[in-house]
Image (tube, rainbow, N blue to C red):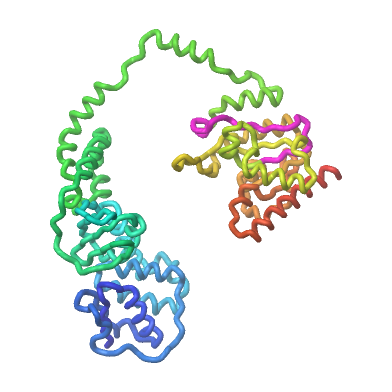
Amino acid sequence: MHRVMLPPRGTAKAWREAARALAAHDVPASQVEWIVGDAAEGALFDAELLPSGEGRRLTTPRAFPDLAGQVLCHRDPQAPGLLYQALLLLQGRRGLMGDPADPLMQRLNRLAKAVRRDIHKMRAFVRFRELPAEAPRRRFAAWFEPEHRIVEANAPFFARRFADMDWAIHTPDLSAVFVDGALTFASGAPRPELPDDAAECLWATYFANVFNPARIKLDAMRSEMPKKYWKNLPETGQIPAMLAAAGSRVAAMREAQATTAPAYAATVSERYRATMPHAPTEIASLDDARAAAAQCTRCNLCMHATQTVFGEGPEDAALMIVGEQPGDQEDLAGRPFVGPAGKVLDECMAVAGIERRKTWLTNAVKHFKFTPRGKRRLHQNPDAGEVQACQWWLGLERRLVQPRLIVGMGATAALALTGPSRLSLTERRGKVEETATGPVLLTWHPSFILRVLDEGRKAEARAQLAEDLTTARELLTA
């Protein structure tokens, strides 16, 4: 019988070393006893040494070490033994981890899920209080009572998040200490006496003011902020009073809501609408289409973009190039392909011998979709519903321009021009596909080339775009 003592710190590493030695010599799981706790501090074995020699070679899926690290944080005393059973089974069943019906994997995944949830709760509910400090770096401390042994696994997150200050997180099992950029661990301790923090009063005031009494869902509140954490959170002391006053606050909100508009409001609104440009009632030309598209509200993208970016080029262009959507610079300028992706396209068109002034350039989606990040607007891919909403405008452009060939750049353009496909763009690139409205040649989007990090792959993709544009020119001249 092998008794393996796993220390409370470095548990995962100690388990890996012991499990590797035991499994390499086919020691059955029933012959191994695993113990985790303070009694194991500084010891690895108790009754019998681990088998010596290399033994057989072990293999595990890439996901197994992460699963093991999470499961070993769980307080279930059977967790190390269950992992060892899985390690033995994986030597003969490579697909074990992907089997959702396997009882052992179901149990291990439940343990790992509980640990991940506890890690998330620690990150959400740790509340630091500032301590007096003579050094330039500020000092903070916090008390937390996790459900599982997660401090060692979770401490690197706090070290990255609060790297500019010294701090300590104390728990009953283990304390994480971060001083001058170095992370260390100490034994657990009772809850320390921490000084009051003025920031807690500010946070509690904010918490009370963002509370919406009309949307009380007690079960959801307890799920996201379980009561076992309340005693250590400064804001939770206000929850009983907030709930008690919810009825009167809802009544006050109802009294303060908007009243019926006065009779003259309709007249004012009518005068205002009269000053706004109107879309043409009939669309007989590209100018009419551009004016109508400027008032488009077919999807919600119009609510955030600066303006509609319609296509441009000669009305009788033989070649139409369709991209995904306007970017940040296109949204501001109101013209397609004037930003970094447009520069790449211009260079590849020049290599292919295609003149921009003789080509109709447009996008599958006419509004810029983005997410704000500080002062920047980061591109977001349009979804299938937004592509479908804008297909009407793209079809109108195709009908009015009547190009002899269309080049679709990127997966979004491919979806808008040819519909859904089971094949990837890699498999379809450089090939001409027949559609109900004419031939379409698919290729890379210039923005994809800009995102490629590997210089060799970037150069290859750029060459392929130029090659596909050359093919388009040759097809038209033929």
Q: Position of residue 219 (x, y in %)?
A: 24, 45
In the image, which residues are magenta? Answer: 300-322
- Would residue 101 be counted in the magenta stretch? no
- Would residue 314 be counted in the magenta stretch? yes
* Vertical arrangement, residue 201 with respect to residue 16, above or below: above
* Vertical arrangement, residue 46 with respect to residue 330, above or below: below
Residue at the far bottom: name it. Answer: 53
Q: Position of residue 155 (x, y in %)?
A: 31, 62
Horizontally, residue 144 falls left or right of residue 94, namely left
Residue visible at 36% across and 80% down in the picture = 17
* Vertical arrangement, residue 444 with respect to residue 202, above or below: below
Horizontally, residue 239 falls left or right of residue 51, namely left
Q: Quadrant location of the N terminus?
A: bottom left
Residue at the far right: name it. Answer: 478
Q: Quadrant of residue 318?
A: top right
Residue visible at 59% across and 57% down in the picture = 453
Q: Quadrant of residue 64?
A: bottom left
Residue visible at 23% across and 52% down in the picture = 128
Horizontally, residue 456 falls left or right of residue 93, namely right
Q: Position of residue 54 (x, y in %)?
A: 42, 89
Residue visible at 61% across and 31% down in the picture = 334
Could you tell me if residue 121 is visible in this image?
A: no
Q: Position of residue 151 (x, y in %)?
A: 27, 64
Chief SS of the magenta region = loop
Q: Quadrant location of the C terminus?
A: top right
Q: Quadrant of residue 241?
A: top left
- How many marks the image carries: the answer is 0
Could you tell me if residue 410 is visible in this image?
A: yes
Pick the residue in front: 222 or 142.
142
Pick the residue in front: 162 or 346.
162
